[in-house]
Amino acid sequence: MDTTTDTRPLDRTLPFSRPRRIAGGVGALALAGLGVAHTVTNAVGFAADPEASWPLFLIVGAGLSLALWAIAAVAWRYSRRGAGRGARVVVLVAGVLCGALAVNVLRVHPEVVLSPAGPGPWSLAAGPALLVAAALPRRRRS
């Protein structure tokens, strides 16, 4: 028997925050794009080098790209469903790392910012978007 007198709707009935969904989606797509650019660039470099090492390519080239895609999937799920505190920490850390990468690219090689094969445009989009997605609340206030 429920004896509470609270007439406010349950938290589950409130819709998800639209800005969080948009920011998380942009961040996740930018991370996926960074993973694709990383894979393509490393595959071309691996094919061009006759003394390239398969284990090094699989760890650094494909492994890092798979990690980026996994983080992109976590960010996408977090922005859509709010997958918990662990996912929020992953999105926050990914946003900080992408922001640091963007600052480093702008500082060292500003001409790479416009190249889609480089980390410039992807990290510039992913860093702030993931930080905003991690900072925004899960549900919209009524």
Image (cartoon, rainbow, N blue to C red):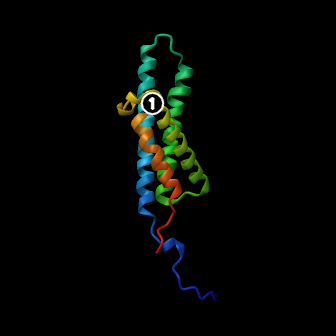
Helix, strand or loop at mark 1:
helix
Which of these two is toward me, 133 or 83?
Answer: 133
Q: Give the percent coordinates (x, y) of residue 72.
A: 48, 45
43 relative position to 1: left or right = left
- Residue 126 lies, with reference to residue 138, above or below; the image says above
Q: Give the percent coordinates (x, y) of residue 137.
A: 52, 63
Q: Mark 1 — residue?
A: 38
Q: Give the percent coordinates (x, y) of residue 2.
A: 62, 86
- Residue 57 lies, with reference to residue 81, above or below; the image says above
Q: Residue furthest top?
A: 50
- Residue 17 lies, with reference to residue 100, above or below; the image says below
Q: Residues within 10 Å of mark 1 (few under 14, many from 20)?
A: many
Q: What residue do we see at 45% from left, 64% from top?
A: 17
Q: Give the percent coordinates (x, y) of residue 69.
A: 48, 40
The quadrant where residue 35 appears: top left
Three-letter amino acid code of the residue under disc 1: His
Which of these two is toward me, 103 or 63?
Answer: 103
Q: What residue do we see at 53% from left, 76% from top?
A: 10
Q: How many badges with numbers are in the image?
A: 1
Which of these two is toward me, 9 or 116?
Answer: 116
Question: Which corner quadrant holds the N terminus?
Answer: bottom right
The quadrant where residue 38 appears: top left
Q: Is residue 124 visible?
A: yes
- Residue 24 lies, with reference to residue 106, above or below; the image says below
Q: Is residue 32 visible?
A: no
Q: What residue do we see at 46% from left, 47% from top?
A: 128
Q: What residue do we see at 59% from left, 89% from top?
A: 5
